[in-house]
């Protein structure tokens, strides 16, 4: 339990204090009087001052439109990264070095991380009471752009020969035939 201090100052001005008359003559700060009126109407209507009244239909539509626009701007973010990463991967070349490995791994891992964090990305825009499903199209666009970005990174990896795309990459799976018979006589081509 905190120790009670012997020195306490009450900064609230009451009627019996010296500055009460002077303070009552001063003008209220901007917005303070409208806030007091709003609180008094809320208490008169039986609402708590901490919870504002329900929004009108026009304001609700306006907020929904803002959420839709914000969702579309979030959905288009990977498109900006695709062009930047494509240029960086073009400039890095096909050699295996730290720069190309860093840019290529970023072009593969970033879209995967974006797709896995899809719900977290759009969570602040979802409203539990809305019956509209306005986040479906932005989510699909977000996934499509991330998949395009991932395809670009995988294409770069295949041009650097880091992906097993040729038949030579799968030679470890070939089953070699065991020789049934062996001879100590060399073939004709070995005889000079």
Image: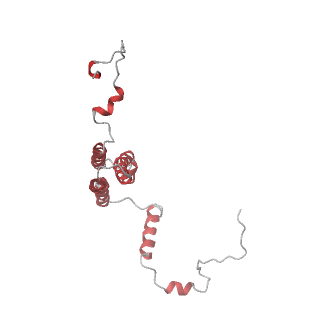
* Direction from residue 8 to residue 137 in the image, left or right: left
Q: Residue at x 30, y 33 (%)?
A: 168
Q: Residue at x 33, y 29 (%)?
A: 171
Res 132 visible = no
As drawn, 2 above or below 10: above
Instruction: Give the percent coordinates (x, y) of residue 20.
Output: 56, 84
Res 96 visible = yes
Identify the colour scheme used. secondary structure
As drawn, 181 above or below 82: above
Instruction: Out of 39 and 58, give the one closest to the viewer.
Output: 58
Give the image quarter of residue 61: bottom left
Instruction: Give the percent coordinates (x, y) of residue 76.
Output: 28, 54
Give the image quarter of residue 178: top left
Instruction: Out of 34 and 157, give the one closest to the viewer.
Output: 157
Of all residues, the one furthest to the top in this rendering is 181
As drawn, 186 above or below 159: above
Instruction: Give the percent coordinates (x, y) of residue 57.
Output: 30, 58
* Direction from residue 133 to residue 5 in the image, left or right: right
State which quarter of the image contains the C terminus. Answer: top left
How many discs appear? 0
Q: Residue at x 34, y 18 (%)?
A: 177
Instruction: Give the percent coordinates (x, y) of residue 162.
Output: 33, 42
* Direction from residue 2 to residue 14 in the image, left or right: left
* Direction from residue 47 to residue 64 in the image, left or right: left
Of all residues, the one furthest to the front in this rendering is 192
Instruction: Out of 84 and 69, give the one closest to the viewer.
Output: 84
As drawn, 37 above or below 153: below
């Amino acid at each position: 339990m905190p120790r009670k201090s012997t020195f306490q100052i009450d900064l609230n001005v009451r009627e019996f204090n010296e500055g009460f008359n002077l303070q009552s003559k001063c003008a209220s700060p901007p917005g303070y009087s409208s806030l007091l009126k709003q609180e008094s109407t809320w208490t008169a209507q039986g609402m708590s001052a901490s919870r504002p009244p329900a929004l009108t239909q026009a304001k609700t539509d306006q907020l929904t439109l803002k959420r839709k626009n914000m969702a579309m701007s979030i959905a288009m973010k990977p498109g900006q990264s695709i062009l930047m990463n494509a240029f960086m991967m073009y400039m890095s070349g096909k050699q295996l070095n730290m720069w190309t490995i860093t840019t290529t791994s970023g072009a593969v891992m970033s879209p995967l991380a974006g797709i896995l964090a899809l719900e977290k990305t759009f969570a602040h825009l979802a409203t539990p009471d809305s019956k509209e499903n306005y986040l479906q199209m932005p989510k699909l666009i977000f996934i499509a752009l991330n998949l395009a970005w991932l395809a670009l990174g995988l294409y770069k990896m295949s041009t650097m020969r880091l992906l097993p795309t040729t038949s030579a990459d799968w030679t470890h799976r070939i089953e070699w035939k065991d020789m049934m018979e062996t001879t100590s006589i060399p073939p004709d081509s070995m005889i000079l």
